[in-house]
Amino acid sequence: MKNKSLSGPAIFMYSVIVLTIVISAICFALHYSGISENAIVLWTGIVSFMILYHFGLRVFMGNVTKKWNITYTHPWFAQRKFEKQLYKFLKVRKWKDKVLTFEPEMYDFEKRTLEQLATTMAKSETDHWINEIISVVSIFFVFIWGCPAAFLISAFAAMIFDAQFIIVQRYNRPIVLRLANRKSKQLQNA
């Protein structure tokens, strides 16, 4: 059995998760035990914990949704009328290839059918919509630590970050499906 190697973004995320577990645990232990009541120690712990929260839940939910039966044929994944103009306005075509990919092998055109790619895109889009919810929920940490502005800004930044992935999936999937349809017609006419 061939070992699956992790992509650069995956290695980065897992490394950050481990690092933030250690940093937040140390900072919270120091602060809440009374060893150090320095605000910098507390806020270093909070920032580390929030990074852990965002990265950890994204990886966790990405693994959970692998067990879900997600298909690109669901109406949710159909492109809406306004989207083409939106993508043109956002110039998605120019930057879509620069977006990071957690599992690049899932997008390998040589090893996967076009329908499999469309399904992968639908699954990825689902993951990033869940991430949007995770981002909004992070605002509720304000009830533990206060400072609403910090949690609102970080939630908004996380939502913008995930929005780029949703946009790319929704931009690319119709292209892949048109190619699949064209290929299917060619096979029928052969």
Image: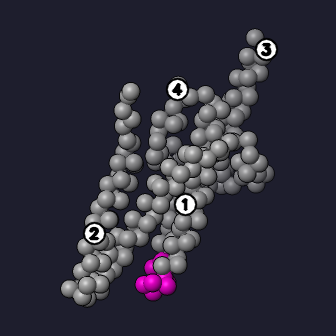
Q: CA distance from mark 1 to mark 3?
A: 43 Å
> Mainly helix, strand or loop, the magenta region?
helix
Answer whether residue 124 is visible to the viewer in this image.
no
Residue drawn at point x = 51 percent, y = 60 percent: 161
Residue 23 numbered tag: 2
Q: CA distance from mark 4 to mark 3?
A: 24 Å
What x and y, as percent, mark residue 160? 54, 63
Q: Position of residue 81 (x, y in %)?
A: 79, 51
The spot of residue 135 in percent (x, y) is 53, 67
Q: Residue at x 61, y 47 (%)?
A: 68
Magenta stretch bounds: 142-151
Which comes sooner in the sequence, label 2 or label 1? 2
Mark earlier in primary sequence (1, 3): 1
Q: In the rendered image of this protein, does residue 110 appear above or below residue 135?
A: above
Q: In this rendering, which labeled residue sits more in front, label 2 or label 3?
A: 2
Query: How far apart, in angstroms, are the residues tagged by discs 4 and 1?
Result: 28 Å
Question: Magenta span has 148?
Answer: yes
Amino acid type assigned to the residue bearing label 2 in the image: Ile
Q: Earlier in the sequence, mark 2 or mark 3?
A: 2
The residue that mark 3 highlights is 189
* Amino acid type of the residue tagged 4 in the rendering: Lys
For label 4, the residue is 111
Instruction: Please indicate whether residue 175 sits to the left or right of residue 98 in the image.
Output: right
Q: Comparing marks 4 and 2, which lies closer to the viewer?
A: 2
What secondary structure is marked by label 2?
Answer: helix
- Frontmost of labels 4 and 3 is 4
Residue at (77%, 48%) from the top-left corner?
A: 75
Q: Secondary structure at mark 4?
A: loop
In the rendering, which numbered label is found on residue 131? 1
